[in-house]
Amino acid sequence: MKNTVKQIVLLFLKNSIRMLSLLFAVSIISFALVSVSPIDPVQQYIMGIGPVSEEQRAEIEAYWGLDRPPVARYIRWLSALFRGDFGTSLLYRRPVTEIILERFQNSLVLMLCAWGVSGIIGFSLGCVMGMNQGKWQDRLFRKLCYFLSSVPTFWLGLVFLLLFSVRLGWFPVGFSTPIGMRNSEVRIWQRLHHLALPAFTLSLMSFSDIALHTRQKMIDVMNSAYVLFARARGEFGWTLFVRHGLRNTLLPALTLQFASFAELFGGSVLAENVFSYPGLGSAVSAAGLHSDVPLLLGITLFSTLFVCIGNMTANLLYGVIDPKIREAQS
Amino acid sequence: MDNKQNPPILEVDNLSISFQMYDGRFDQKALQIISELNIKIYAGEILAIAGSSGSGKSLLASAILGILPNNATVTGKMCYNGQMLTPKLQKRLRGTEIALVPQSVDFLDPLMQVGTQADGHKKPFPTQKRRRFFQRFGLPSGIEKCYPFQLSGGMARRVLVSTALIADAQLIIADEPTPGMGLEQALDTLKMFREMADDKKAVILITHDIDLAFAVADRIAVFYAGTIVETANAHDFQIGPVALRHPYSKALWRALPQNEFESIAGVQPYAGNLPKGCLFAPRCKCKTPRCMQESPPLRMLRGGEVRCFCAK
């Protein structure tokens, strides 16, 4: 047991180093991309404060260090990052860290709901399909999965918006809180009410992957030698599912689910824009459209971290659940 | 065989198994794997079913246990202790009266500890009883917390055999229990089966290893192209072709390295491409026009059973 804990700590450290080096690489690439892009941060800044003369413009450039070579600018940016200074958003005129943290809270709730719902529904449907291979349940749900995985998220979001919000009026059309209310006055159920439709849309996007994957894995397990032996010993139905099916399909499903953080984040950008939901996803598209370089770079790094944590969790979980992998890593 | 007055514990009569396969996009065809197979097994004996690998012997085990895939069609009759072996009865007997001892560690769930797995799913768990068997087989006490991949081949074998003993099954079907084992391990395993048979249990030993079948079995059933062509006392195989009945059994005996090491021409017919009449006729030296037309019925001959018109 003590050994296992030691292994997991070691694994954690190894993954952390890998994650830090990845973050470093992402920071270089994204900085380089912004440097060569036609975005002019000074122009964006000036647009916010009104007309300025050429001299004033040059002064601003010198003040920001834009007259220096890109490598020097990168090092300056990086050292500021280490001090926790991500700069100030040109669009919102507030520190980038503040915006990210505030927006991320909204996004996190949205993504966690969608992630949990899609994981549970996807895995359960996958199990039902796999255990009933070729029967009507399998055929019906498989068609549903193919349909949902070929429909774009934003289109599905628009359809839901039209149907449930506009036609039926069950859900609000947008935002995370009722319009014209102070943040402190908003009740929890009001937040949930605003959350429901975007979260549902987002979960529909990713659940077919996990369902189809679990189905295939379950079919493989049910055709395996150890299930044949279990059946020869009198196991069937629910017992067989719990003792062997669940055990052997859960691990790959969990890994897939944690590794889906990237798609989840990508999906949230679309869903948040369709539902005008004030999360990180809508902030990143606003930053991109309005050339808000500090915010864009900040969110890029932050989302890298988010996706990395998902993948790392998947790796660590593998180690905890699968004894074979635990042994191989030591 | 002094106990032949008792009814057989298992009697398989005219068993055929075929599979529905898609031939092209829409055409379905039946692929016959086992044809008109007959065996009888009595308490206290080991019956070896010997035949080449991949000829469908394992399906026989699945058919007796009633765990064939859904696309299989079974005809014929099976009786267990004089009772018709219906799917309902099979369900009741699986893992209690009839036990399977499978081939290898692959038959253990890779994610379940060996002890829990050997205990099975029936409550109360027979943990104490299982520990006694593990001890008797010389499995160290720590092994119950191990996962299958941590076991050696021999250990896995002993775990698998112990599952049959824990269940206290009356009929044990061992499917290829020795490949991949050293001679010593193989003999050790066979000794366990011998002990079970001496304990008034019936053991069916499915194997492609003829030498092994000679060494341990009381009777040997020779499996060819999905049917049993001859059932003989193990002693007949020690004497050789004079005592044997079916041309294939004789050829099999001659093909052994310690005998003439001489193989006959041709190969076993594949399922879906079975000849009309006697299944062995295309390769048989003493075939008659009748052999090519009719399938020979099973008949008693010199204390054994044979499926051949010409055997004397």
Image (cartoon, coloured by chain):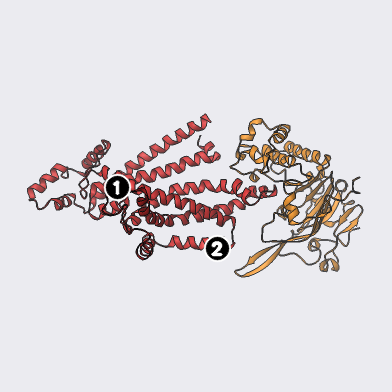
Circle 1 — which element? Answer: helix
Q: Is residue A264 above or below residue B309?
A: above
Spot the residue most to the top. Answer: A2
Tag 1 residue: A185
Q: Is residue B183 toward the left or the right of residue A250 in the image?
A: right
Depth check: give the residue in front, B29 or A160. Answer: A160
Q: Quadrant of residue A64?
A: top left
Q: Where B208 sits versus B281, above or below?
A: above
Q: Give the residue type that dot 1 points to.
A: Glu
The residue at 72%/43% (across/down) is B178
Residue A12 disc label: none
- Residue placed furthest toward the bottom: B26
Q: Is residue A281 above or below residue A86?
A: below
Mark sitting earlier along the chain (2/1): 2
* Amino acid at the residue labelled 2: Arg
Provide residue A111's location: percent of width, then percent of height: 39, 50
Residue A139: assigned label: 2
Q: Are marks 2 and 1 in contact (CB under 8 Å)?
A: no
Q: The chain shown in red is which?
A: A
The span from disc 2 to disc 1 (Cα, nearest Å) is 48 Å
Is residue A29 something that shows in the picture? no
Q: Chain of mark 2?
A: A
| Left or right for B262, reference A150 | right
Q: Which chain is orange?
A: B
Q: Are marks 2 and 1 on the same chain?
A: yes
